[in-house]
Image (cartoon, rainbow, N blue to C red):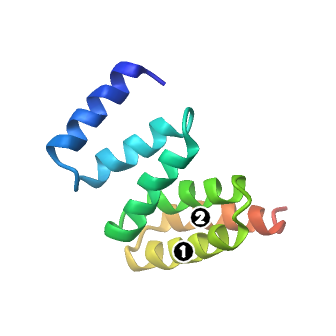
């Protein structure tokens, strides 16, 4: 993670705290240094920008890593529904594969 990149993203966030791309980028940057802060950003996206499909994959994986299995499973399921609603076949396949791996169903 680059401190400069984080500072730039925080500045973008201050300018527009409702930009889902910036929020997602901040969550991704924080994953390496502060998982709880990353989770806060992911949870904000899930609450206020539920259509931002990429969030589900990463938020569910982080929940699983933190031992929050019920939250991870719910997030995978909601992501699959959202990907279908958005007609995002690629995201659906990626989420489905990750969910199956999470469940121990991977080949």
Which residue is rendered at x = 70% and y = 59% of the image?
64
**Seen from this angle, which residue lies furthest left?**
15
Which residue is rendered at x = 82% and y = 69% of the image?
105
Figure quadrant of residue 72: bottom right
Element type at mark 1: helix
Relative to residue 82, is residue 5 drawn left or right? left
State whether residue 45 appears in this view.
yes
x and y, in percent, of residue 43 in the image: 45, 62
Q: Is residue 82 above or below residue 57?
A: below
Which of the pair 34/56 is nearer the observer? 34
Relative to residue 55, is residue 22 drawn left or right? left
Residue tagged 1: 80
x and y, in percent, of residue 18 in the image: 22, 56
Q: Is residue 53 above or below residue 33?
A: below
Residue tagged 2: 95
x and y, in percent, of residue 84 in the image: 46, 77
Which residue is rendered at x = 46% and y = 54% of the image?
40
x and y, in percent, of residue 33 in the image: 55, 32
Q: Quarter of the image containing the C terminus? A: bottom right
Which residue is rendered at x = 44% and y = 45% of the image?
27
Crowd class of label 2 (few under 14; some 14 to 19; many from 20; radius 10 Å): many
Which of the pair 36/75 is nearer the observer? 36
What count of labels does the image hold?
Answer: 2
């Amino acid at each position: 993670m680059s401190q400069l990149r984080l500072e730039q993203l925080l500045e973008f966030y201050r300018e527009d705290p409702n930009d889902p791309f910036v929020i997602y980028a901040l969550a991704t940057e924080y994953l390496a240094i502060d998982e709880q802060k990353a989770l806060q950003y992911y949870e904000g996206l899930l609450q206020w920008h539920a259509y931002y499909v990429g969030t589900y994959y990463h938020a569910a994986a982080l929940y699983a890593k933190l031992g929050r299995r019920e939250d991870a499973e719910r997030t995978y399921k909601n992501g699959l529904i959202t990907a279908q609603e958005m007609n995002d076949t690629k995201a659906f396949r990626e989420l489905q594969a990750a969910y199956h791996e999470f469940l121990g169903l991977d080949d």
